[in-house]
Image (cartoon, grey):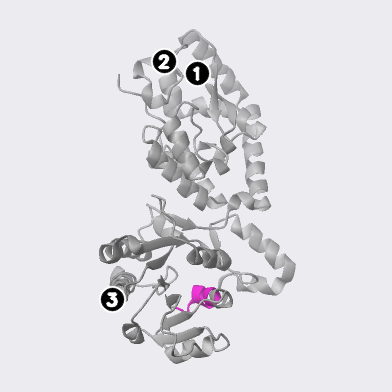
């Protein structure tokens, strides 16, 4: 235990006996951090961390005795795998969190890291957990202002620890690791090591949610799965829908002069330019600009139908085949759309391929709102998974997201 002469801790951690705490605290202690573990039962915490000299423990009443705080990590939560009413979740996730903030204020703390699940980022999630965590964030900001560092994490894991639901994989050796690799393609996950790295570093100062998840673009399994799906869809479109291509080609040529296929330079992964293919929906000679900057009068009669049904996107099967695009990702913009290019660059969005549909599109965010669009693309990059991709594809197929709007005149 920490000598009594040391009364300032590097980290005060609430909910220290929980799933995250049991894996995070040892990593921080091994790095030389002095830690005060806080929970309902101080004696149980002391037993749990008895082998770590730099970890001390107290209960929540003992938190009132602490006079100083550098960083407080708030892990205490009524979690999303628990049942209960919204009032039950509010008492723990909101009211108790506010009391912790009040202690943090009294101790003149520098940074409060509040951990939440990425599930609470889902606009469609109205579970008591998601609603209470969103309310907690707003209330906590009201108490401690910009010292709140709200961090969203995915399914939590560590070396040889695959979470409570998949704990049996640890007994399967290398096969367990491979199976967990497959599981990681399905949903966002967060490692204990990356969380430890984050809390030991400076708070992020981006105007977007702090989402701490394992990078799917580094997973060869995820890259292989998405590439196979891209190829399957591309080949299917080019072979099965070839008669529809012929009909649309003829309708476009009959409707207005000019080529049926529209080819245009767009910004791709790593900001590399590539040629995007679409069925032409505007009159030939229309200026190269963002769709929202083009007059509605430039859209042809058949073009209006193609844009409304998204059939104009079909030739992008060629881009899928060439590996320049993927099914789901940020919609590629023009090089001249500098505001959007710069916003995406600042948020690291160009680490991933552009997509035929995307997270922003099903939320009706188009290129007329460049900073909002870049932020939504950043959120997708952090949350991307096979299950999320399928959800976006299905919502797009059923009409969610109407594409970029043209100007009214």
**Residue 212, percent across and down?**
50, 58
Residue at 59% of width from left, 35% of height from top? 325
Identify which residue, 40 or 165, lies in the foreground: 40
Q: Is residue 87 visible?
A: yes
Look at mark 2 in the image and give the residue it sits on: 300
Mark closest to the chain's N terminus, 1 or 3: 3
Give the quadrant of the C terminus.
Answer: top left
> Quadrant of the rendered structure where residue 246 is?
top right
Residue at 53% of width from left, 73% of height from top? 24
Is mark 2 in CB contact (under 8 Å) with mark 3? no
Mark closest to the chain's N terminus, 1 or 2: 1
Q: CA distance from mark 1 to mark 3?
A: 63 Å
**Residue 207, percent across and down?**
38, 49
Question: Which stretch did the figure color magenta?
Answer: 16-25
Front disc: 2 or 3: 3
Identify which residue, 400 or 109, lies in the foreground: 109
Is mark 1 in CB contact (under 8 Å) with mark 2? yes
**Residue 130, percent across and down?**
37, 62
Identify which residue, 260 or 246, lies in the foreground: 260
Q: Secondary structure at mark 3?
A: helix
Residue at 28% of width from left, 76% of height from top? 106
Q: Is residue 134 left or right of residue 267?
A: left
Look at mark 1 in the image and give the residue it sits on: 280
Q: Secondary structure at mark 1?
A: loop
Mark closest to the chain's N terminus, 2 or 3: 3
Name above or below for residue 111 compared with residue 286: below
Look at mark 3 in the image and give the residue it sits on: 106
Q: Residue furthest left?
A: 142
Chief secondary structure of the magenta portion? helix
Q: Residues within 10 Å of mark 3 (few under 14, many from 20)?
A: some
């Amino acid at each position: 235990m920490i000598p009594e002469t040391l009364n300032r801790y590097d980290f005060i951690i609430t909910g220290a006996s929980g799933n995250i705490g049991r894996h995070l605290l040892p990593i921080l202690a091994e790095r030389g951090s002095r830690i005060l573990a806080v929970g309902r039962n101080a004696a149980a915490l002391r037993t749990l961390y008895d082998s770590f000299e730099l970890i001390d423990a107290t209960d929540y009443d003992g938190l009132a005795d602490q006079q100083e705080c550098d960083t407080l990590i708030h892990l205490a939560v009524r979690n999303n795998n628990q049942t209960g009413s919204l009032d039950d979740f509010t008492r723990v996730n909101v009211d108790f969190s506010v009391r912790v903030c009040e202690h943090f204020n009294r101790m003149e703390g520098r940074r409060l890291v509040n951990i939440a699940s990425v599930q609470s980022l889902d606009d469609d999630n109205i579970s008591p957990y998601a609603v209470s965590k969103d309310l907690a964030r707003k209330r906590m900001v009201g108490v401690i202002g910009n010292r709140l560092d709200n961090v969203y994490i995915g399914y939590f894991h560590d070396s040889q620890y695959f979470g409570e639901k998949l704990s049996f994989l640890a007994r399967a050796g290398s096969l367990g690791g491979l199976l967990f690799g497959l599981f990681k393609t399905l949903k966002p996950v967060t490692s204990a090591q990356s969380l430890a790295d984050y809390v030991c570093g400076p708070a992020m100062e981006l105007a977007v949610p702090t989402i701490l998840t394992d990078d799917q673009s580094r997973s060869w399994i995820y890259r292989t799965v998405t590439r196979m799906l891209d190829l399957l869809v591309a080949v299917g479109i080019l072979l099965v829908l070839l008669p529809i291509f012929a009909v649309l080609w003829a309708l476009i040529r009959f409707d207005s002069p000019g080529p049926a296929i529209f080819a245009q330079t767009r910004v791709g992964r790593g900001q590399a330019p590539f040629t995007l293919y679409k069925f032409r929906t505007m009159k030939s000679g229309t200026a190269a600009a963002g769709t929202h900057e083009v007059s509605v009068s430039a859209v042809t009669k058949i073009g209006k139908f193609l844009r409304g049904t998204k059939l104009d996107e079909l030739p992008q099967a060629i881009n899928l085949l060439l590996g320049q695009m993927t099914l789901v990702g940020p919609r590629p913009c023009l090089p001249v759309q500098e505001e959007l290019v710069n916003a995406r660059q600042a948020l690291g969005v160009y680490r991933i391929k552009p997509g035929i549909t995307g997270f922003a599109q099903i939320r009706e965010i188009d290129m007329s709102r460049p900073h909002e669009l870049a932020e939504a693309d950043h959120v997708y990059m952090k949350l991307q998974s096979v299950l999320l991709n399928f959800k976006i594809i299905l919502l797009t197929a059923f009409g969610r997201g109407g594409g970029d709007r043209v100007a009214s005149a």
